[in-house]
Image: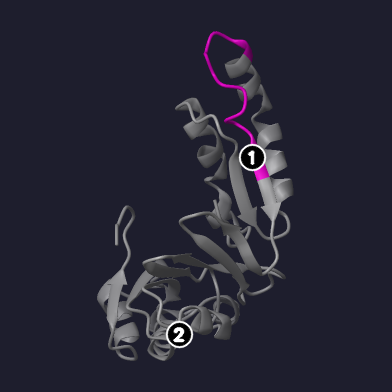
Amino acid sequence: AFITHLHSDHTAGLADLLLTPWVLERSDPLDLYGPPGIAAMAGHLQAAYAEDVRIRLDGLEPANPSGWEARAHEVAPGEVYRDDRVRVIAFEVDHGAWERAYGYRIEAPDRVIVIAGDTRPSDAVREQARGADLLLHEVICEAGLAKRTAEWQAYHRSSHTTGPELGRLAAAAQPRRLVLHHVLLSGCTEDELLAEVRGEFAGEVILGRDLDVF
């Protein structure tokens, strides 16, 4: 698993990701790749569920002894993973007060996918996504954000990318397909948000849904 940063909305499901596949008989430890702090988070999760693990291992359940474990890899920008099918490159993005937040470029023989992570408009994202087959990018509706308090506007503009900003970034990078996720409507409709992005980018724009396949 590749973690962009350690905000709760990006990590609250880690316990489920770690333990549920083990209960369903995964035997390999889960490899976690992410910024500094991911090792401590993984260790705390394993400590929090130590009693659950003990009961499953020592009781009647025929649980395997290794599938509950996490192997954390605190990575620096650059290549962080490679096998015979895929190469994964981490790059730094700008997400508010976080000292280290990542996007990931995933390269396979027949396609390139870029996951921007949470970020304000980023030169690194634009360069990594140039000509990619798919860019998965967060977005916040500009019209909705403009109605928030000055404090919330300052926070979101330091941490996230508005619809028009994302459209301009995509127009520069020219991915074959732009998929919106981590969508903050802030009172806008989905159509209004899509119009903001499409007003700057003529390529394919899709509002992502859970379980979509591309």
Is 59 contained in the magenta span? yes
Quarter of image, res 163: bottom left
Residue drawn where x is 56% and y is 58% of the image: 82
Q: Residue furthest front?
A: 84
Could you give the CA–CA distance between mark 1 and mark 2, rounded to whole angstroms?
Answer: 42 Å
Q: Which residues are magenta?
A: 58-71
Q: Secondary structure at mark 1?
A: strand
| Of the pair 70 and 112, the residue shown nearer to us | 112
Q: Which residue is mark 1?
A: 70
Q: Which residue is mark 2?
A: 146
Left or right of 17 in this view: 173: left
The type of residue carrying mark 2 is Ala
Residue drawn where x is 36% and y is 67% of the image: 110
Q: Secondary structure of the magenta portion, mostly?
A: loop
| Of the pair 151 and 137, the residue shown nearer to us | 137
Residue drawn where x is 64% and y is 75% of the image: 96
